[in-house]
Amino acid sequence: MNEVSEANKISTKLHEIVEMRHLNESTFVVKLEKNNLEFQAGQHINVGPANSIHTREYSIYSGENDDFLEILVKEVSDGFISPVLKKQRPGNMLVVEEPVGYFSLPRKSNPGEKLLFIASGTGISPFHSFIKSNPGLDFTILHGIRDNSEKYDSDFYSSSRYIACTSRQKSDNSYFGRVTNYLEENPVLSNTRCYLCGNSSMIHDVYDILESQGVSSEMIHAEVYF
């Protein structure tokens, strides 16, 4: 066996599904056996059915120290992977490739540094992993969603730290408007380290707003989902 084939053999493993947890009609959490897989919060893995040649990238939703592996999935009706994943059941096997990516917290954080996590939709996934993996972070999370059904596991976050920005539904416990509207009304301090994850248009617009408010590019980190 040549080196390339051997590397592929090592980097791809089958993981058994432990639980399928549905958050709304289209979004669900797949809980898998960890199989000693090591990762850094913020990394992503390629996942797909065991009998398929197709995989898709998903940020890891679970914490580094959890004894299981989780991904947060939103079904895309014409997608190759998400509709198939939605039909999976506990006991089924999924292909999981080795974690990759550099969207992560600094190895050595500055004491007292404030963190701002800005997500759209399932872009909240790496932030969920950040927070589970690093108790005691001084963070605020802005979650851009359409309505309250997309507040994925919002009870996990302290209510003083999680701000849902809903674009299509007014409610007493959410900000009505996009994350860009919220940021324009609530300027960010220049010494805040900002992480952006979600669709490219949100990231582009938020990046411009943050820079206009005096946040340097060195303090802005981004992961584009779609």
Image: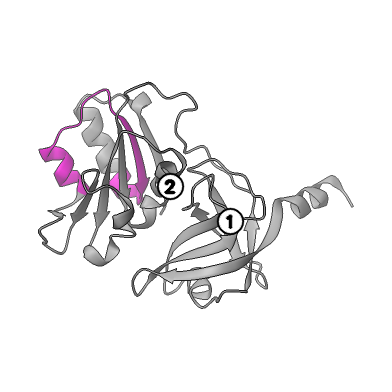
- Against 177, residue 194 (above or below) is above
**Residue 33 visible within the image:** yes
Give the x, y percent position of residue 188: 20, 31
Give the x, y percent position of residue 56: 54, 60
Which quadrant is the C terminus positioned in? bottom left
Q: Nearer the viewer, residue 93 or 160?
A: 160
| Residue shown at 45% from the left, 47% from the top | 129
| Residue shown at 62% from the left, 74% from the top | 91
| Residue shown at 41% from the left, 52% from the top | 125
Q: Quadrant of residue 49?
A: bottom right
| Residue shown at 34% from the left, 41% from the top | 196
Q: Amino acid at mark 2?
A: Pro
Q: Which residues are magenta?
A: 179-203
Q: Earlier in the sequence, mark 2 or mark 1?
A: 1
Quick one: SS at disc 2? helix
Q: Which residue is mark 1?
A: 46
Q: Nearer the viewer, residue 103 or 107?
A: 107
Q: Nearer the viewer, residue 130 or 195?
A: 130
193 magenta-colored: yes
Count up the numbered dots: 2
Q: Quadrant of residue 22?
A: bottom left
From the viewer's perspective, tell me whether residue 215 is left or right of residue 74.
left
Quick one: SS at disc 1? strand
Coloring scheme used = one colour
Q: Which residue is mark 2?
A: 126
Give the x, y percent position of residue 153: 34, 59
Give the distance between the C-alpha atoms of the residues marked 2 and 1, in whole angstroms: 14 Å
**Which label sits in the foreground, 2 or 1?**
2
Q: Which mark is residue 167?
A: none
Give the x, y percent position of residue 90: 57, 74
Q: Amino acid at mark 1?
A: Asn
22 magenta-colored: no
